[in-house]
Image (spheres, rainbow, N blue to C red):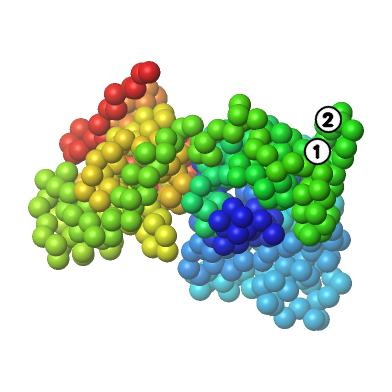
């Protein structure tokens, strides 16, 4: 109804899932990292627990997880946990496409079927993960049955990983004394919190941008009210924002004011605060009826001047927004130049052909120089203090920008051959977390190191970890012993947690790159001058 009026190609605040509209705050990225850790840790077994209020994005993260599964991963997704222990086992067998007709109704027979399948999967190098959504609805008996499944193991490792997604009540449920054995097996916990005020603003801008809008029709005060009334819960933001746009369209208002958001929230939220007034309307009516009612009941006049502010968030001034968009449009022509500049920061001169090859960013790209494709929040990049290439969305394609400096509110990037300081919120509007990093490593370094390994690679790992711990003020061990023992794994997990990496205790490429970032050699992010005024 309001799409043409606000220059939209599709509804921006639909509550139906659409991967194009996914917005990942730093907490969402951390939550996804915990889920990926749960899948990736393989034979360590145990449980991963992700909780959050209704509408905070747990199911969205689950879908993203399913899209990023490692190879040779088998998933059993349980969406309806209101099941008896027997029904739960049957559902898991069904999700794994097992033949269990002869075992129906028998917990022992179903467990035997599962155990045989898990042993076969293990022999084939496959990992098996059970994901239970809305896990707060599991009965104590079903939870105990889930725990017993983690007893399926070989002499050296567990055969099954279980991820529990649920509302905060799940934490209360797992605190019950009779479930203490299960609680002790939870290896990773994460609670997904709502968006903060600035994230709500970026979230709204993101969805409007994906829907084709070239401006933000919400005033500054309206965005603040939207965050306050929704408490930062994405699903509630969508409902209130959609109703506010309906009301704005019905009154022919170019900008949605704080008052319209308050009224939309009153209608959308049961028990919400309603203002005392002599009239009342229902935004849930049909589109045509709403338009007629508002057209007859309200004069077509602008909102009070105090609220009719520019429809652009204060953190992003219109000139900067326009400059950034123009550079994004030109960026495809500068791809080779961006990568040549990136290589140059590491004293590596490449021609256009080598720059195009470098864009593949697949492991060793030059003698002693590796390129890593990874994903993470800006705060992690700030902690690493290394220049990286950000992959930004520009319309229907992605372009490269070189991150040169960052502070709490802004970042310095080189985009389309131009160095500019831009608000972090503007970058995050066009960035899904993908970046490319260069890092130096000795030729003897293996691709992955884990407990039980030994050799010069582990000696390098110990040396870099001690350097990182010293810089972070953590107690460490300067020993250069060449054995990867349990204590080294514990220290590595601790550092991974501090950096927001998957805390699996394995020194893979991303962890190695993070450790190499503590070496004094190589380029650093510049320090931005604080702006006053």
- The residue under the point 23% across, 35% down is 524
- The residue under the point 52% across, 58% down is 212
Q: Position of residue 114 (x, y in %)?
A: 69, 70
Screen quadrant of the C terminus: top left
Q: Position of residue 447 (x, y in %)?
A: 31, 56
- The residue under the point 69% across, 59% down is 1
Label drawn at residue 381: none
- The residue under the point 42% across, 39% down is 318
Label drawn at residue 275: 2
Find the distance from the CA under tag 2 to the CA under tag 1. Answer: 8 Å
249 left or right, relative to 462? right
Q: Position of residue 331 (x, y in %)?
A: 28, 55
55 left or right, relative to 460? right
Q: Nearer the viewer, residue 100 or 65?
A: 65
Label drawn at residue 266: 1
**Position of 430 relative to 106 (above/below):** above
Quadrant of the image occupied by residue 193: top right
Q: Position of residue 359 (x, y in %)?
A: 26, 60
Could you tell which of marks 2 and 1 lies nearer the N-terminus?
1
Mark 2 vs mark 1: in front = 2
Q: Tell me, yes or no, whether the two marked residues, 2 and 1, touch with CB atoms within 8 Å.
A: yes
- The reply to whether residue 354 is in sight is yes
Q: Nearer the viewer, residue 481 or 513?
A: 513
**Position of 410 relative to 401 (above/below):** above
- The reply to whether residue 504 is in sight is no
303 left or right, relative to 330? right
Q: Helix, strand, or loop for circle 2?
A: loop
Total numbered badges shown on the rendered structure: 2
């Amino acid at each position: 109804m309001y799409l043409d009026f606000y220059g939209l190609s599709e509804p921006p605040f639909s509550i139906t899932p659409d991967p194009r509209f996914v917005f990942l705050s730093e907490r969402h990225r951390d939550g996804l990292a915990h889920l990926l850790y749960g899948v990736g840790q393989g034979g360590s077994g145990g449980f991963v627990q992700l909780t959050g209020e209704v509408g905070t994005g747990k199911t969205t993260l689950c879908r993203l997880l399913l899209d990023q599964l490692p190879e040779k991963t088998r998933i059993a997704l349980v969406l309806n946990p209101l099941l008896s222990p027997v029904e739960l086992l049957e559902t898991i067998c069904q999700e794994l496409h097992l033949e269990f007709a002869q075992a129906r109704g028998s917990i022992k027979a179903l467990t035997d079927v599962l155990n045989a399948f898990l042993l076969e999967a293990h022999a084939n190098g496959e990992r098996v993960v059970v994901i239970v959504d809305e896990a707060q609805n599991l009965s104590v008996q079903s939870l105990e049955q889930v725990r017993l499944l983690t007893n399926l193991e070989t002499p050296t490792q567990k055969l099954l990983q279980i991820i529990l997604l649920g509302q905060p009540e799940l934490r209360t449920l797992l605190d019950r004394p009779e479930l203490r054995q299960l609680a002790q097996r939870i290896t990773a916990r994460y609670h997904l919190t709502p968006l903060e005020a600035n994230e709500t603003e970026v979230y709204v801008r993101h969805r409007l941008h994906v829907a084709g809008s070239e401006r933000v029709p919400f005033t500054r005060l309206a965005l603040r009210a939207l965050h306050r009334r929704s408490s930062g819960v994405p699903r509630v933001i969508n409902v209130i924002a959609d109703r506010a746009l309906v009301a704005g369209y019905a009154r022919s208002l170019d900008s949605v004011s704080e008052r319209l958001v308050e009224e939309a929230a009153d209608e959308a939220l049961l028990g919400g605060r309603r203002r005392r007034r002599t009239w009342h309307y229902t935004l849930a009516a049909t589109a045509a009826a709403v338009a007629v009612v508002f057209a007859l009941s309200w004069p077509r006049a602008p909102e009070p001047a105090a609220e009719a502010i520019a429809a652009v968030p204060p953190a992003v001034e219109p000139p900067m927004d326009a400059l950034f968009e123009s550079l994004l449009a030109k960026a495809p022509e500068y791809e080779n130049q961006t990568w040549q500049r990136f290589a140059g920061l590491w004293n590596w001169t490449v021609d256009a052909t080598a720059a195009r090859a470098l864009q593949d960013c697949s492991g060793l790209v030059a003698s002693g120089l590796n390129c890593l494709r990874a994903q993470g929040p800006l705060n992690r990049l700030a902690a690493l203090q290394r220049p990286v290439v950000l992959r930004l969305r520009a319309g229907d394609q992605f372009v490269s920008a070189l991150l040169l400096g960052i502070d709490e509110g802004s970042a310095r990037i080189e985009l389309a051959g131009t160095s500019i300081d831009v608000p972090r919120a503007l970058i995050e509007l066009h960035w899904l977390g993908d970046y490319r990093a260069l890092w130096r490593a000795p030729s003897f370094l293996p691709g992955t190191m884990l407990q039980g390994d030994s050799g010069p690679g582990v000696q390098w790992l110990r040396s870099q970890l001690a350097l990182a711990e010293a810089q972070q003020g953590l107690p460490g061990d300067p020993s250069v012993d060449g054995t990867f023992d349990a204590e080294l794994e514990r220290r590595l997990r601790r550092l991974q947690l501090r950096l927001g990496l998957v805390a699996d205790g394995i020194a893979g490429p991303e962890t190695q790159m993070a450790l190499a970032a503590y070496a004094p050699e190589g380029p650093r992010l510049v320090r931005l001058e604080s702006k006053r005024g």
